[in-house]
Image (cartoon, helix red, strand yellow):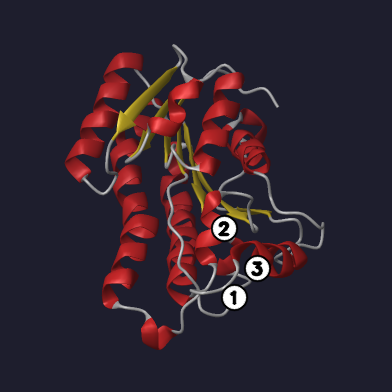
Amino acid sequence: MAIEQQVVIVTGAGGGMGQAILKYLLEQGNIVVGLDLSVTSLASLYSDALQIYNVNVLDEDKVNDVFRNVYDKYGRIDGLVNALGIAQAATPIEDVSIDEWNRLMDVNVKSLFITTKAVVPYMKVRKKGAIVTIASISAVRPRPGLQAYIASKGAAESFSRGLAIELAPHQIRVNTIHPGPSDTQMLSQFTAAGANVEQTKQDVFVQSVPLGRLVDPTDIAGAVGYLLSDAASMVTGTTLHVDGGRGL
């Protein structure tokens, strides 16, 4: 689905899903700005239409600087894709530390607050914009041992819904995507300590998807493209399940 050229910021750009989203948006002729702590994996995506910032999105001042630079350069910011996220190894609640809980909440939730707060003023100026947050099907179809991760993704979805009603008068749309088990490096990080990663991938994750395969990052990229496009001009406050039926 072609997207009229937009200026889109993508967090978590260095991850497997973030890279797929960047590539898709670039192929559609957009100007894309990628943010991540590690950006070395993005070298192969070099393009005049791509800007890369090595930045910690939990640093509010630096995020504000980046967004201001993007707006000053292009005169607009049309879209924000929050693709940043970290996993939790399957762990009983009594063995989860406060530090691990806080880290999951910081990266998976606090980052959304920082980036959205930074982008909204620029979208309000034009009375148009689209924000897409990548959450997880685990928020509605949980697995044992992932309680902190699930809580963070549930918060991400609720945060998006709250923003959708708040920002609707400004014609800013806010939506969430719940990916199912995805074929990225992050999937192995959900495996319990000591378990066989490949066996768990096949016996647990693949088997949990009614359509019979893991979600490919390109599946998510296509969904992001739709939610950013004018084809979704009346879609806000929704959660799109791209999960092969995992949430059923």
Vertical arrangement, residue 87 with respect to residue 40, above or below: below
Helix, strand or loop status at disc 2: helix
Task: Give the CA distance from mark 2 to mark 3.
Answer: 10 Å
Nearer to me, 161 or 110: 110
Query: Comparing marks 1 and 2, which lies closer to the viewer?
Result: 2
Would you call the spot at circle 2 few (<14 residues within 10 Å), some (14-19), or many (20 or more)?
some
Residue ID for mark 2: 187
Assign a secondary structure to mark 1: loop
Q: Amino acid at mark 1?
A: Arg
Name the residue beneath numbered marker 3: 200
User: What residue is shown at x 55% (from left), y 21% (from top)?
Assistant: 26
Determine the CA span between mark 1 and mark 2: 13 Å
Q: What whole-number distance in Å separates the C-alpha atoms at marks 3 and 1? A: 13 Å
Position in image of residue 71 (x %, y %): 31, 22
Q: Residue at x 29, y 44 (%)?
A: 57
- Residue extending farthest to the bottom is 94
The picture places residue 132, in percent across and down from the top left corner, at 51, 44
Residue flagged by tag 3: what amino acid is it?
Answer: Thr
Quadrant location of residue 233?
top right
Q: Nearer the viewer, residue 51 or 199?
A: 199
Can residue 103 be spotted in the picture?
yes
The disc label shown at residue 143, or none: 1
Residue in the foreground of this view, choosing between 185 and 120: 185
| Image quarter in which the N terminus is found | top right
Compare marks 1 and 2 and give the one earlier in the sequence.
1
From the top left corner, tell me how far across and down residue 118 is, in percent: 29, 39
Could you say where residue 78 lies in the image, as x and y percent from the top left? Answer: 45, 28
